[in-house]
Image (cartoon, helix red, strand yellow):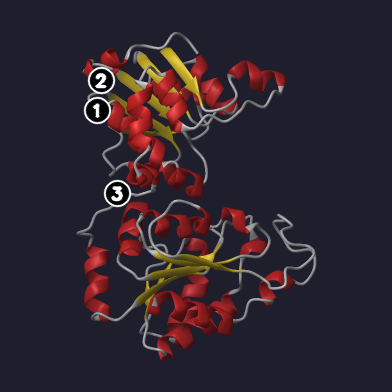
Amino acid sequence: MQGAISSADILENVKMNILVIRFTSLGDLVTLELAFRAIRHFFPQAKITFLTSGIGKGLYEDSGYFDECIVFSRSYRAIWSALRGVKFDTVFNLQSNRPSHMLMMGIGAENIFNSSSSWWQKFLGIKGKTKWPPQLLKQAGIDPIKVDSYFGSSAMQTIVLPYNQESVFSKSIRTSFEGRPVIAVATGASERWESKKWGDERFEQLVGELLEKGYGIVLIGSKLEEAAGESICTRYPEVMNLIAKTSLAELKAVLASVDLLIGNDSGPAHLAGGVGTNTLSIFGSTDIKHCVAMMPYRGRHEYLVAEPRLSCQPCYKSKCPTQHECMEAVSVRDVVSAVQKILDA
């Protein structure tokens, strides 16, 4: 990190260029909304470029936090070429891993603020202490009193993802279900996390029971869940199937239009929490400390996990080495009961 610049320069310099780096999972990118919003707040006139993944671009290109979103596809040369000639006054490296430090070697910058390990710490294998947004902003020269005042507000400590309230999908949901409570169901998880999945058959049974109770059902997910979605819709044609039919920006609007999301421990739960929609997450191989309920989202957020806990939980194994007992312990009846408690409240 080089010398910080003054608060006056930051707030008044119209030509200031800022680079924000973060490419990671959907859940992590959602939880960083607080940091992205704060950077835009304290640098209102700056041109802010976001170097991120395709997921990050989908989440934030309509947020107003960034003037430009550039996708890092593991090609250093492509990024260096795209940013050639751009002189950044400030870089907030919120990734702070080896690839992000490698990128910085080909990008000109006056001041670099790392959220954890610097390049030399990474090179030597030294784990740096994580710095939260208030610390980084103070290091960048923002008046500490203003920073503390900003983050002292409860509104500035709550994750709020911007979304398009006039989305075509949102209008379709409102029209299709005529005022009934609507539940979004996400049957999947990351491709490498088979152990997180409650199971397609159980989700199909759950959908049937929820329909009987009068709820409207919307299916969401990626191409990985298309087969499960087709099976459910063949059996229950009144279900709205949006699996692999929305962008991330559109999915935010869809989730903001429903009353509850049910799913495994996966990114869509954080997306729903980010737009203020209630969630019910089913946990197995991972720890409930990662649950939406443990984070500063709006709405009501609950989880279901084997009770009593199994001795192997949480195992963090991508594939269960036994019979998936943790997920078997959560019944369809348990989920239906939890749904009614959340929506009745």
Vertical placement of residue 334 versus 275, above or below: below
Toward the viewer: 203 or 226?
Answer: 203
Toward the viewer: 67 or 112?
Answer: 112
10 Å neighbourhood of mark 2: few (<14), some, or many (≥20)?
A: some
From the image, tell me which residue sits under label 3.
162
Q: Quadrant of the C terminus?
A: bottom left
Amino acid at pointer 1: Pro
> Residue 111 appears at what percent x and percent y?
43, 14
Badge number at residue 11: 2
Q: Which of disc 3 and disc 2 is earlier in sequence?
A: 2
Q: Helix, strand, or loop for circle 3?
A: loop
Q: CA–CA distance between discs 2 and 3?
A: 23 Å
Vertical placement of residue 34 versus 240, above or below: above
10 Å neighbourhood of mark 3: few (<14), some, or many (≥20)?
A: some
Vertical placement of residue 315 versus 89, above or below: below
User: Which residue appears at 53% of the width and 29% of the height?
Assistant: 131
Q: Helix, strand, or loop for circle 1?
A: loop
10 Å neighbourhood of mark 1: few (<14), some, or many (≥20)?
A: some
Q: CA–CA distance between discs 2 and 1?
A: 7 Å
Residue 107 can be seen in this image? no
> Residue 328 appears at what percent x and percent y?
68, 76
Badge number at residue 44: 1
User: Which residue appears at 22% of the width and 63% of the height?
Assistant: 168
Of badges 2 and 3, the one in the foreground is: 2
Mark 3 and mark 2 in contact (Cβ < 8 Å)? Answer: no
Badge number at residue 94: none
**Residue 123 relative to residue 223: left or right:** right
